Image: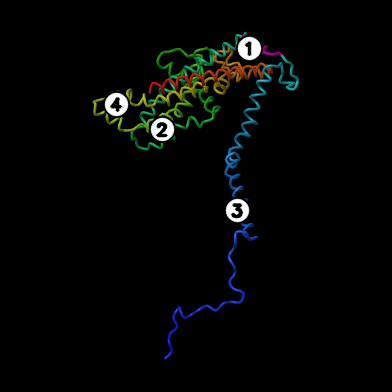
Amino acid sequence: MTRMATRSDIAASPVKGGAAPGRTPGSRSADKDDRRRSKLSRRWQRDARWSPYAFVSPFFLLFAAFGLFPLIYTGWASLHQVELTAPTDMNWVGLKNYTRIFDDDFFWNAAQNTLTIGIISTVPQLMIAMGIAHILNYKLRASTFWRVAMLAPYATSIAAATLVFVLLFGRDYGMINWALGAVGIDPVGWQDDKWPGQIAVSTIIIWRWTGYNALIYLAAMQAIPQDLYESAALDGASRWRQFLHVTLPSLRPTILFTVVVSTIGASQVFGEPLLFDPNKGASGGAEHQFQTLGLYLYEQGWVNQHLGRASAIAWTMFAILIVIGLINQLISRRLRASS
Protein backbone atom coordinates (compact mmCIF):
# COMPACT_ATOMS: atom_id res chain seq x y z
CA MET A 1 0.00 0.00 0.00
CA THR A 2 1.37 3.29 -0.97
CA ARG A 3 1.90 5.95 1.69
CA MET A 4 0.10 9.24 1.11
CA ALA A 5 2.50 12.07 0.75
CA THR A 6 2.30 14.72 3.41
CA ARG A 7 2.97 18.42 3.02
CA SER A 8 6.29 18.01 4.70
CA ASP A 9 7.29 15.25 2.29
CA ILE A 10 6.65 17.41 -0.72
CA ALA A 11 9.59 19.67 -1.36
CA ALA A 12 9.66 22.19 -4.12
CA SER A 13 12.37 21.35 -6.51
CA PRO A 14 14.75 24.17 -6.97
CA VAL A 15 14.26 26.10 -10.17
CA LYS A 16 17.29 26.78 -12.18
CA GLY A 17 18.42 30.22 -11.53
CA GLY A 18 16.30 30.50 -8.33
CA ALA A 19 13.41 32.90 -7.57
CA ALA A 20 13.66 36.60 -8.49
CA PRO A 21 15.64 38.33 -5.77
CA GLY A 22 13.83 41.03 -3.68
CA ARG A 23 14.62 44.72 -4.24
CA THR A 24 17.54 45.89 -2.27
CA PRO A 25 17.68 49.51 -1.06
CA GLY A 26 20.57 50.31 -3.32
CA SER A 27 19.17 48.82 -6.49
CA ARG A 28 18.31 50.91 -9.54
CA SER A 29 14.55 50.14 -9.44
CA ALA A 30 14.35 51.11 -5.78
CA ASP A 31 16.03 54.45 -6.46
CA LYS A 32 13.65 55.06 -9.35
CA ASP A 33 10.60 54.33 -7.17
CA ASP A 34 11.92 56.60 -4.42
CA ARG A 35 12.43 59.46 -6.88
CA ARG A 36 8.92 58.98 -8.26
CA ARG A 37 7.44 58.99 -4.76
CA SER A 38 9.42 62.08 -3.84
CA LYS A 39 8.27 63.81 -7.02
CA LEU A 40 4.63 62.92 -6.36
CA SER A 41 4.96 64.07 -2.76
CA ARG A 42 6.32 67.47 -3.82
CA ARG A 43 3.58 67.79 -6.44
CA TRP A 44 0.95 66.96 -3.83
CA GLN A 45 2.39 69.53 -1.43
CA ARG A 46 2.36 72.20 -4.13
CA ASP A 47 -1.20 71.25 -5.08
CA ALA A 48 -2.39 71.37 -1.46
CA ARG A 49 -0.66 74.71 -0.97
CA TRP A 50 -1.71 76.57 -4.12
CA SER A 51 -5.02 74.98 -5.14
CA PRO A 52 -7.11 77.05 -2.69
CA TYR A 53 -5.68 80.23 -4.20
CA ALA A 54 -6.54 78.99 -7.69
CA PHE A 55 -10.12 78.28 -6.60
CA VAL A 56 -10.67 81.78 -5.19
CA SER A 57 -8.65 83.62 -7.86
CA PRO A 58 -11.63 84.18 -10.26
CA PHE A 59 -13.39 86.26 -7.63
CA PHE A 60 -10.33 88.42 -6.98
CA LEU A 61 -9.66 88.83 -10.69
CA LEU A 62 -13.22 89.99 -11.32
CA PHE A 63 -13.10 92.22 -8.24
CA ALA A 64 -9.83 93.78 -9.40
CA ALA A 65 -11.21 94.39 -12.90
CA PHE A 66 -14.70 95.62 -12.03
CA GLY A 67 -14.32 96.81 -8.42
CA LEU A 68 -10.83 97.86 -7.41
CA PHE A 69 -9.72 99.41 -10.71
CA PRO A 70 -12.87 101.56 -11.14
CA LEU A 71 -12.55 102.67 -7.51
CA ILE A 72 -8.93 103.76 -7.93
CA TYR A 73 -9.58 105.34 -11.32
CA THR A 74 -12.59 107.23 -9.97
CA GLY A 75 -10.45 108.59 -7.13
CA TRP A 76 -7.83 109.71 -9.65
CA ALA A 77 -10.47 111.29 -11.91
CA SER A 78 -11.93 113.19 -8.95
CA LEU A 79 -8.68 115.16 -8.79
CA HIS A 80 -8.96 116.23 -12.43
CA GLN A 81 -11.24 118.23 -14.63
CA VAL A 82 -12.54 115.71 -17.15
CA GLU A 83 -15.63 115.78 -19.32
CA LEU A 84 -17.74 112.92 -20.65
CA THR A 85 -17.14 114.07 -24.24
CA ALA A 86 -13.34 113.77 -23.80
CA PRO A 87 -12.61 111.27 -21.02
CA THR A 88 -8.91 111.04 -21.90
CA ASP A 89 -8.28 114.79 -21.55
CA MET A 90 -7.63 115.23 -17.84
CA ASN A 91 -6.48 118.49 -16.27
CA TRP A 92 -5.19 118.41 -12.70
CA VAL A 93 -7.31 120.52 -10.33
CA GLY A 94 -6.55 118.89 -6.98
CA LEU A 95 -9.39 119.15 -4.49
CA LYS A 96 -11.32 121.73 -6.51
CA ASN A 97 -14.06 119.26 -7.43
CA TYR A 98 -14.65 118.49 -3.75
CA THR A 99 -14.78 122.13 -2.68
CA ARG A 100 -17.07 122.92 -5.59
CA ILE A 101 -19.65 120.26 -4.73
CA PHE A 102 -19.54 121.24 -1.05
CA ASP A 103 -20.38 124.80 -2.10
CA ASP A 104 -23.24 123.58 -4.28
CA ASP A 105 -26.69 123.97 -2.68
CA PHE A 106 -28.01 121.10 -4.79
CA PHE A 107 -25.49 118.74 -3.17
CA TRP A 108 -26.70 119.60 0.32
CA ASN A 109 -30.30 119.38 -0.85
CA ALA A 110 -29.60 115.89 -2.22
CA ALA A 111 -27.82 114.90 1.01
CA GLN A 112 -30.78 116.11 3.07
CA ASN A 113 -33.24 114.28 0.84
CA THR A 114 -31.17 111.10 1.09
CA LEU A 115 -31.18 111.37 4.88
CA THR A 116 -34.92 111.99 5.20
CA ILE A 117 -35.85 109.30 2.66
CA GLY A 118 -33.52 106.91 4.48
CA ILE A 119 -35.18 107.59 7.83
CA ILE A 120 -38.74 107.47 6.45
CA SER A 121 -38.07 104.20 4.65
CA THR A 122 -35.76 102.38 7.08
CA VAL A 123 -37.57 102.82 10.42
CA PRO A 124 -41.06 101.66 9.31
CA GLN A 125 -39.53 98.99 7.09
CA LEU A 126 -37.62 97.30 9.92
CA MET A 127 -40.52 97.64 12.36
CA ILE A 128 -42.95 96.02 9.91
CA ALA A 129 -40.38 93.34 9.07
CA MET A 130 -39.98 92.53 12.76
CA GLY A 131 -43.76 92.14 13.17
CA ILE A 132 -44.09 89.94 10.09
CA ALA A 133 -41.18 87.76 11.22
CA HIS A 134 -42.75 87.40 14.67
CA ILE A 135 -46.01 86.21 13.07
CA LEU A 136 -44.24 83.83 10.68
CA ASN A 137 -42.30 82.39 13.60
CA TYR A 138 -45.50 80.73 14.83
CA LYS A 139 -46.70 77.46 13.32
CA LEU A 140 -48.88 78.58 10.43
CA ARG A 141 -50.51 76.63 7.66
CA ALA A 142 -48.65 76.92 4.36
CA SER A 143 -45.73 78.60 6.10
CA THR A 144 -43.47 77.95 3.10
CA PHE A 145 -45.91 79.80 0.83
CA TRP A 146 -45.93 82.85 3.11
CA ARG A 147 -42.15 82.93 3.30
CA VAL A 148 -41.83 82.75 -0.47
CA ALA A 149 -44.48 85.46 -0.80
CA MET A 150 -42.35 87.72 1.39
CA LEU A 151 -39.59 87.60 -1.24
CA ALA A 152 -41.89 88.40 -4.16
CA PRO A 153 -41.50 92.20 -3.87
CA TYR A 154 -37.72 91.82 -3.56
CA ALA A 155 -37.62 89.77 -6.75
CA THR A 156 -39.75 92.31 -8.62
CA SER A 157 -37.96 94.67 -10.98
CA ILE A 158 -37.45 98.20 -9.69
CA ALA A 159 -38.82 99.61 -12.93
CA ALA A 160 -42.00 97.51 -12.81
CA ALA A 161 -42.64 98.25 -9.13
CA THR A 162 -42.03 101.99 -9.49
CA LEU A 163 -44.28 102.31 -12.52
CA VAL A 164 -47.09 100.60 -10.59
CA PHE A 165 -46.63 103.00 -7.68
CA VAL A 166 -46.61 105.94 -10.11
CA LEU A 167 -50.10 104.89 -11.14
CA LEU A 168 -51.16 104.45 -7.52
CA PHE A 169 -49.88 107.89 -6.53
CA GLY A 170 -51.22 109.69 -9.60
CA ARG A 171 -52.76 113.06 -8.75
CA ASP A 172 -55.91 112.85 -10.84
CA TYR A 173 -56.54 109.13 -11.34
CA GLY A 174 -54.41 107.47 -8.68
CA MET A 175 -55.97 105.00 -6.28
CA ILE A 176 -54.33 106.67 -3.25
CA ASN A 177 -55.95 110.04 -3.95
CA TRP A 178 -59.22 108.27 -4.73
CA ALA A 179 -59.12 106.63 -1.28
CA LEU A 180 -58.25 109.97 0.35
CA GLY A 181 -61.10 111.66 -1.48
CA ALA A 182 -63.48 108.98 -0.19
CA VAL A 183 -62.78 110.18 3.36
CA GLY A 184 -62.95 113.88 2.49
CA ILE A 185 -59.23 114.66 1.99
CA ASP A 186 -58.17 116.79 -0.97
CA PRO A 187 -55.94 115.22 -3.64
CA VAL A 188 -52.23 115.30 -2.86
CA GLY A 189 -49.56 116.18 -5.42
CA TRP A 190 -47.32 113.22 -4.71
CA GLN A 191 -44.95 114.02 -7.57
CA ASP A 192 -45.01 117.79 -7.13
CA ASP A 193 -44.51 118.48 -3.42
CA LYS A 194 -41.47 117.69 -1.29
CA TRP A 195 -42.75 115.65 1.62
CA PRO A 196 -45.45 113.76 -0.29
CA GLY A 197 -42.87 112.90 -2.94
CA GLN A 198 -40.38 111.62 -0.39
CA ILE A 199 -43.08 109.61 1.38
CA ALA A 200 -44.13 108.06 -1.94
CA VAL A 201 -40.53 107.12 -2.83
CA SER A 202 -40.04 105.71 0.68
CA THR A 203 -43.20 103.64 0.26
CA ILE A 204 -41.69 101.94 -2.78
CA ILE A 205 -38.54 101.12 -0.84
CA ILE A 206 -40.56 99.81 2.11
CA TRP A 207 -42.64 97.58 -0.18
CA ARG A 208 -39.56 96.10 -1.86
CA TRP A 209 -37.34 95.42 1.15
CA THR A 210 -39.66 94.61 4.06
CA GLY A 211 -40.03 90.93 3.15
CA TYR A 212 -36.27 90.54 2.71
CA ASN A 213 -35.58 91.87 6.20
CA ALA A 214 -38.49 89.86 7.63
CA LEU A 215 -36.86 86.61 6.49
CA ILE A 216 -33.56 87.67 8.06
CA TYR A 217 -35.33 88.32 11.35
CA LEU A 218 -37.23 85.04 11.03
CA ALA A 219 -34.01 83.06 10.61
CA ALA A 220 -32.54 84.76 13.68
CA MET A 221 -35.71 84.10 15.72
CA GLN A 222 -35.64 80.41 14.89
CA ALA A 223 -32.09 80.22 16.23
CA ILE A 224 -33.18 81.43 19.69
CA PRO A 225 -33.29 78.50 22.15
CA GLN A 226 -36.82 77.52 23.15
CA ASP A 227 -35.66 77.05 26.74
CA LEU A 228 -35.60 80.83 27.14
CA TYR A 229 -39.25 81.12 26.17
CA GLU A 230 -40.22 78.21 28.39
CA SER A 231 -38.43 79.77 31.37
CA ALA A 232 -40.10 83.11 30.70
CA ALA A 233 -43.51 81.41 30.45
CA LEU A 234 -42.94 79.63 33.77
CA ASP A 235 -42.17 83.00 35.34
CA GLY A 236 -45.54 84.26 34.13
CA ALA A 237 -44.34 86.40 31.23
CA SER A 238 -46.92 87.10 28.56
CA ARG A 239 -46.24 86.83 24.82
CA TRP A 240 -45.56 90.56 24.65
CA ARG A 241 -43.08 90.44 27.56
CA GLN A 242 -41.39 87.41 26.01
CA PHE A 243 -40.96 89.41 22.82
CA LEU A 244 -39.53 92.41 24.70
CA HIS A 245 -37.25 90.57 27.12
CA VAL A 246 -36.26 87.45 25.15
CA THR A 247 -36.67 88.01 21.42
CA LEU A 248 -35.40 91.57 21.06
CA PRO A 249 -32.25 91.15 23.22
CA SER A 250 -31.39 87.98 21.30
CA LEU A 251 -31.85 89.81 17.99
CA ARG A 252 -29.60 92.76 18.77
CA PRO A 253 -26.77 91.71 16.41
CA THR A 254 -29.26 90.95 13.63
CA ILE A 255 -31.07 94.24 14.15
CA LEU A 256 -27.77 96.09 13.98
CA PHE A 257 -26.90 94.27 10.76
CA THR A 258 -30.20 95.14 9.09
CA VAL A 259 -29.95 98.77 10.24
CA VAL A 260 -26.48 99.10 8.70
CA VAL A 261 -27.42 97.35 5.47
CA SER A 262 -30.62 99.40 5.14
CA THR A 263 -28.70 102.60 5.82
CA ILE A 264 -26.16 101.75 3.13
CA GLY A 265 -28.96 100.91 0.73
CA ALA A 266 -30.78 104.16 1.54
CA SER A 267 -27.65 106.18 0.81
CA GLN A 268 -27.53 104.62 -2.68
CA VAL A 269 -31.20 105.01 -3.65
CA PHE A 270 -31.35 105.69 -7.36
CA GLY A 271 -33.93 103.78 -9.39
CA GLU A 272 -37.02 104.63 -7.36
CA PRO A 273 -36.73 108.46 -7.43
CA LEU A 274 -35.48 108.38 -11.03
CA LEU A 275 -38.55 106.54 -12.31
CA PHE A 276 -40.95 108.30 -9.97
CA ASP A 277 -40.06 111.68 -11.49
CA PRO A 278 -42.84 112.58 -13.95
CA ASN A 279 -40.22 113.96 -16.35
CA LYS A 280 -38.10 110.79 -15.97
CA GLY A 281 -35.03 112.95 -15.38
CA ALA A 282 -32.24 113.02 -12.81
CA SER A 283 -33.44 116.20 -11.12
CA GLY A 284 -35.71 114.33 -8.69
CA GLY A 285 -38.77 116.44 -9.41
CA ALA A 286 -39.23 119.91 -10.81
CA GLU A 287 -37.70 121.51 -7.70
CA HIS A 288 -35.28 118.67 -6.78
CA GLN A 289 -37.66 117.77 -3.98
CA PHE A 290 -36.70 114.08 -3.89
CA GLN A 291 -33.31 114.11 -5.60
CA THR A 292 -30.91 111.78 -3.78
CA LEU A 293 -27.12 111.66 -3.85
CA GLY A 294 -27.29 108.87 -6.42
CA LEU A 295 -29.42 111.03 -8.72
CA TYR A 296 -27.17 114.05 -8.10
CA LEU A 297 -24.14 111.98 -9.10
CA TYR A 298 -25.92 110.79 -12.24
CA GLU A 299 -26.98 114.32 -13.11
CA GLN A 300 -23.46 115.70 -12.79
CA GLY A 301 -21.78 112.87 -14.68
CA TRP A 302 -24.20 111.91 -17.44
CA VAL A 303 -26.45 114.94 -17.84
CA ASN A 304 -24.02 117.79 -17.20
CA GLN A 305 -21.12 115.56 -18.40
CA HIS A 306 -18.75 116.56 -15.56
CA LEU A 307 -17.05 113.24 -14.86
CA GLY A 308 -14.51 114.74 -12.48
CA ARG A 309 -17.22 116.26 -10.33
CA ALA A 310 -19.25 113.04 -10.44
CA SER A 311 -16.17 111.11 -9.32
CA ALA A 312 -15.78 113.47 -6.35
CA ILE A 313 -19.43 112.83 -5.41
CA ALA A 314 -18.86 109.08 -5.66
CA TRP A 315 -15.87 109.25 -3.33
CA THR A 316 -17.80 111.43 -0.92
CA MET A 317 -20.53 108.77 -0.79
CA PHE A 318 -17.83 106.15 -0.29
CA ALA A 319 -16.47 108.13 2.67
CA ILE A 320 -19.99 108.28 4.14
CA LEU A 321 -20.24 104.49 3.89
CA ILE A 322 -16.89 104.13 5.65
CA VAL A 323 -18.16 106.30 8.49
CA ILE A 324 -21.29 104.13 8.71
CA GLY A 325 -19.10 101.04 8.87
CA LEU A 326 -16.96 102.50 11.64
CA ILE A 327 -20.06 103.40 13.65
CA ASN A 328 -21.33 99.87 13.14
CA GLN A 329 -18.04 98.44 14.41
CA LEU A 330 -18.08 100.70 17.46
CA ILE A 331 -21.64 99.76 18.35
CA SER A 332 -20.88 96.06 17.79
CA ARG A 333 -17.95 96.22 20.20
CA ARG A 334 -20.07 97.89 22.86
CA LEU A 335 -22.81 95.32 22.44
CA ARG A 336 -20.32 92.47 22.79
CA ALA A 337 -18.79 94.12 25.86
CA SER A 338 -22.19 94.62 27.48
CA SER A 339 -23.24 91.04 26.78
Query: Is most of the magenta stretch helix, strand or loop?
Result: helix
Give percent across and percent down for residue 293.
58, 17
Measured Cα–Cα span from mark 1 to mark 4: 52 Å
- Is the C terminus in the top left, top right, bottom left or bottom right quadrant? top left
Q: Earlier in the sequence, mark 3 or mark 2?
A: 3
Pointers 4 and 3 in contact (CB under 8 A)?
no
Tell me the amino acid under the disc marked 2.
Ala
- Indicate the secondary structure of the residue bearing disc 2: helix
Residue 11 is one of the magenta-drawn residues: no
Q: At 60% across and 59% down in the image, what residue appears? A: 25
**Which numbered disc covers residue 44?**
none
Task: Name the residue tied to disc 4.
Answer: 239
Give percent across and percent down for residue 14.
56, 77
Task: Name the residue tied to disc 1.
Answer: 101
Task: Name the residue tied to disc 2.
Answer: 219
- Indicate the secondary structure of the residue bearing disc 3: helix
Magenta stretch in the rendered image: 93-102
**Which numbered disc covers residue 37?**
3
The crowding category of the residue bearing disc 2, from other C-alpha atoms within 10 Å (few below 14, some 14 to 19, many at least 20), is some
